[in-house]
């Protein structure tokens, strides 16, 4: 079935892509990453080990992986706009379920569901944003960067709310935080539901184009390592800040700095994202991300943690954008949904394996520093792997 593509060029592409970015804001910025903010209280209240805490993000990542596999057929069946909207509504449901019970199986299902919804929303939203951006070649990379800044909004808003809700209501109030996240997400969903989403101009294809995997295996390996490495930092850094003596204000400041960094990503990396140079752009950005993840290992002073949050945040969101740019440079438009889905699958496998493994390492050695060591090492390996990817010829 052909993917729908209206013939009229969008009049306000930046506005439309910013609205599309609300899908990963909810599914990733809130649905996935707000878990880190409530993890310390959930772990204390529900008597979880670090392995169990990591398992909840493994379940989320498994859902994300399943959603990545399902995204392309769902897009073919229902179209890009419908896929974005319905998957975002699934994320809303999962947030509400997270607030209802401390039951292990209920929470596991909620984490699974938000993973599925986030992946479908991400793949569909990224493909739609790429089609909108292609109508404006001179601004395409900048416009795409706006989409990837979406999770940063979710991180900032949840960072401004969750630590202070926990402080106000005291130990065991993690479920109240999830209700607050649900209400916030309901508000953010409204623009997605009332805006007419369009996919740019151009003729519709008779069938989706083929996307070849073998020529980009080394690049997929690098993105897999990124998925395995980043998740340890994003899962356990709030616990690390708290263990270092940081209260609600310190946790909120760290998380907000991390999220706010996304808003400068389009300007910081604009030229590098525009390079059609194989995996080089990803290597550079992932190298900076490795540096950000490594900094807490050299000390947990307020200054060191601030620099770490800024460096990690600025590069983290750009890495995802660089993979979409890679797909856009190296495949025809009708193959973009499959290409983005392939990237998301590699990423999803990495982040499925990462949390439980790193949690087990932390339980064994008794220190979160080992989790950060593992995170930085995996990110560095991902940067090295990406450097070996060369440009492809579009078919």
Image (cartoon, rainbow, N blue to C red):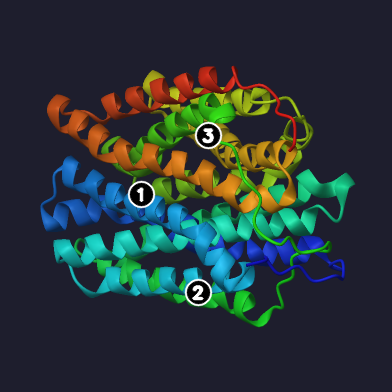
Q: Give above or below for 183 relative to 1.
A: below
Disc with the residue nearer the chain's start (1 vs 3): 1
The N terminus sits in image quarter: bottom right
Residue 61 got which mark?
1
Name the front one of labels 2 and 3. 2
Q: Secondary structure at mark 2?
A: helix
Determine the image quadrant of residue 188.
bottom right
Residue 210 got which mark?
none
Disc 2 crowd rating (10 Å Cα; few below 14, some 14-19, many 20+) is: some
Residue 296 percent coordinates (x, y): 40, 26
Disc with the residue nearer the chain's start (1 vs 2): 1
Residue 114 percent coordinates (x, y): 38, 62
Disc 3 crowd rating (10 Å Cα; few below 14, some 14-19, many 20+) is: many
Query: What's the distance in space between the residues labelled 1 and 3, CA to CA?
Result: 20 Å
Q: Give above or below for 35 relative to 169.
A: above
Regarding residue 221, the answer to whether it shows in the image is yes
Q: Which residue is mark 2?
A: 86
Disc with the residue nearer the chain's start (2 vs 3): 2
Total residue callouts: 3
Query: What's the distance in space between the residues labelled 1 and 2, CA to CA?
Result: 19 Å
């Amino acid at each position: 079935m052909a993917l729908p593509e209206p013939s009229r060029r969008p009049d306000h592409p930046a506005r439309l892509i910013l609205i599309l970015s609300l899908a990963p804001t909810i599914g990733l910025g809130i649905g996935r990453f707000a878990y880190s903010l409530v993890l310390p209280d959930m772990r204390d209240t529900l008597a979880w080990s670090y392995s169990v805490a990591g398992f909840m993000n493994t379940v989320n990542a498994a859902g994300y992986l399943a959603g990545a596999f399902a995204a392309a057929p769902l897009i073919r069946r229902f179209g890009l706009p419908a896929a974005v909207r319905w998957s975002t509504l699934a994320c809303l449901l999962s947030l509400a379920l997270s607030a209802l019970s401390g039951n292990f199986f209920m929470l596991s299902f909620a984490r699974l569901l938000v993973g599925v919804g986030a992946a479908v929303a991400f793949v569909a939203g990224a493909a739609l944003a790429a089609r909108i951006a292609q109508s404006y070649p001179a601004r395409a990379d900048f416009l795409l960067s706006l989409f990837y800044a979406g999770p940063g909004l979710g991180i900032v808003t949840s960072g401004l709310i969750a630590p202070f809700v926990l402080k106000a209501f005291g130990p065991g109030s993690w479920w109240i935080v999830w209700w607050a996240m649900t209400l916030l997400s309901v508000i953010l969903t409204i623009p997605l539901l009332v805006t007419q989403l369009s996919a740019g101009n151009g003729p519709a294809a008779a069938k989706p184009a083929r996307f070849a995997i073998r020529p980009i295996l080394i690049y997929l390996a690098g993105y897999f390592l990124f998925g395995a490495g980043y998740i340890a930092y994003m899962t356990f850094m709030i616990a690390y800040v708290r263990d270092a003596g940081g209260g609600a204000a310190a946790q909120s400041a760290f998380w907000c700095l991390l999220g706010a960094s996304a808003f400068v990503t389009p300007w910081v990396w604009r030229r590098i994202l525009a390079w059609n140079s194989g995996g080089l752009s990803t290597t550079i950005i992932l190298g900076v991300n490795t540096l950000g993840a490594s900094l807490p290992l050299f000390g947990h002073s307020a200054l060191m943690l601030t620099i770490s949050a800024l460096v990690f945040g600025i590069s983290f969101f750009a890495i995802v954008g660089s993979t979409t740019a890679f797909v856009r440079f190296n495949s025809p438009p009708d193959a973009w949904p499959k290409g983005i889905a392939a990237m998301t699958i590699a990423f999803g496998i990495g982040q499925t394996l990462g949390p439980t493994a790193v949690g087990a390492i932390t339980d064994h050695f008794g220190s979160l520093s080992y989790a950060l060591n593992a995170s930085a090492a995996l990110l560095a390996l991902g940067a090295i792997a990406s450097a070996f990817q060369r440009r492809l010829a579009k078919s």
